[in-house]
Image: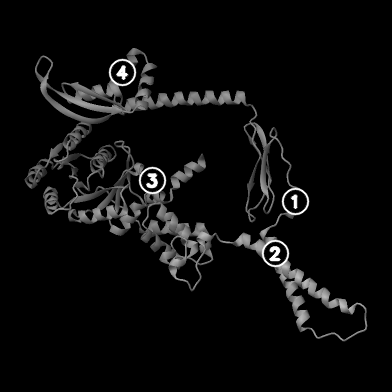
Amino acid sequence: MRVKKFEAKTMKDALKMVKSELGPDAVILGARENKKSFGLGGETSFEVTAAVSDITLQKKRFVESRMRPDDREKFRSSQARSQKEMIEKIVERREQQQRNAREQADRAANPRPITSVSYIDIPDDQPVYARRQGIQGGLEFVQESYGRGSVQRQSASAPVQRPQTAAERAAEPRPADVRNKIRSLAKEAWEAGRATEVAPAPRRQVNAQAPATAPTASTEIESLKGEIQRLQSILSGFTQVPQSFQQAPSNAPVHAATYPGAEYGLSYDFSSIFQKLVETGVSAELAAEVGLRAQSEIDPMQAKKKAIVEAWVAKWFLQNISVCERPFSARFQVFTGPMGSGKTSQLVKAASQLIIRDKKKIAIVSTDTSKVGAVDQLKIYCQILNVPFAIVRGPEDWRWLEAHLAAVDHVLVDMPGLSLKEADEISRLRALMPSHEQSQVHMCLSSSMKESDALDAVRRFRVTQPTDLIFTGLDLSVNHGVIATVQVRSGLPLHSFGVGPRVPEDFEAATKERVLDLLFKLSSLKRSTEK
């Protein structure tokens, strides 16, 4: 990270120096007006502190190094958006050239890549086909076999391992064969036992072979019983449930079961979805509530299929998550929340969206006069966006301000970050709130907060009468289940998300599909599958 200070006569000249030296992606850290004399005229000056990442600065210098002096001056004096587009275009072209060069070098070094032999187990019910496909100039042959066989992949130049013969594959025990053999042997043993016990005793005959008949039958029965016991032990190896997830007997208390969700009355088939929701940050109570609802509506035979259970849960969240249909319908947009929740950053992103996307006239008002640098930071952003800026210190300022902002479409208000644990803080916040009927109060929360802290903050800020929720810092959090939990428990719809530090790119309107994506991590799963 490069941090540098710039000083000029006017704020415009200072920002121009920042853009010329550090590039269009520089971040303004602070600005102040120096009362000391500047130059020979004794005028005041403006000092701006800016920062930029090393990688971004290297890209800018690389692009400038490939330009002629005249083109370099035109590039530095151009708009920030044009500079950014040109830098991305030249850097992307350079990276593509390097990738092409590496691919050509790899093809020259390895004209026919060798694919190692690998065996992949496939399920019994999977349809099997033989196919052949070409991979980078070589041929890859795929051989597949039924049952507990394997898929063997090898290239023409790879060492060939001896495949299993038909006799070896047939000799491998299969669950279906084992079950069928047990049934047939058990049936034979049962019929033999009934023939011995129920059949009438034969007449005594003078025959040399008669005494040997009974011992032979009993010996055969004993051998069949031993074979059945052996096969039962083999079969138990295929159907045995792990010890840590075995379900308790029906007459045992609920807490005796050891699988996830058993203490809430969930069956074993719904333990995986319960554990998945809890791991993603959803509260255990909400996950159990959803699981019990699914358990009562899904057929028991269908519940054994994991995909059906997950689809039902996803549908439940799509039906029960609430979002704002009109995010910026009111004239006054008030951003409130605890300290460090990202109110100011989300306000600036929303202002940029209203100006660039919706072509609205806006004004920004700050009521946070206690936080150091809060007013100066918003003032700099207003100069960049070229919008009016005002400071409100009491209720009387609102009456004067509303008369001077009649031509503005939206007024964005930044409220101070307070804990609201004392009565004077509550009265102060109420005095600074705009008394206009057309107001939307956005409750800003960090997605990294714990569920209990977030719900407690929503309870304390009920005095501001919030209309919706904003969650910031999605890039700083791994699990986002707190978003769904707080929304469902509070009943406040979701307004928008802050997905990163960039202004205004990292602003995202809230949707039900986005919440579902955060819970089940569908985007990351898709990226890993594509890779």
Residue depth check, mark 1 versus mark 2: number of the one nearer the observer? 2
What is the C-alpha distance between the residues marked 1 and 3? 48 Å
What is the C-alpha distance between the residues marked 4 and 2? 87 Å
What is the C-alpha distance between the residues marked 3 and 2? 49 Å
What is the C-alpha distance between the residues marked 1 and 2? 21 Å
**CB of mark 1 within 8 Å of CB of mark 4?**
no
Relative height, residue 375 to residue 258 (above, below): above
Would you say residue 425 is visible in this rendering?
Answer: yes
Percent across and percent down for residue 519 are 40, 51
Q: Nearer the viewer, residue 22 or 386?
A: 22
Q: Secondary structure at mark 3?
A: loop
In the picture, the quarter occupied by the N terminus is top left
Neighbor class of circle 2 (other Cα within 10 Å; few <14, some 14-19, many 20+) is: few
380 displayed left or right of 395: right
Residue depth check, mark 4 versus mark 3: number of the one nearer the observer? 3
Q: Provide the residue designation for mark 1.
A: 168
Q: Secondary structure at mark 1?
A: helix
The earlier-in-sequence mark between 1 and 4 is: 4
Q: Nearer the viewer, residue 480 or 10?
A: 480
Of the numbered discs in the image, which one, if any, rests on residue 230?
Answer: 2
Relative height, residue 71 to residue 355 (above, below): above
Residue type at numbered disc 4:
Lys
Q: Provide the residue designation for mark 3.
A: 478
**CB of mark 1 within 8 Å of CB of mark 2?**
no
The earlier-in-sequence mark between 1 and 3 is: 1
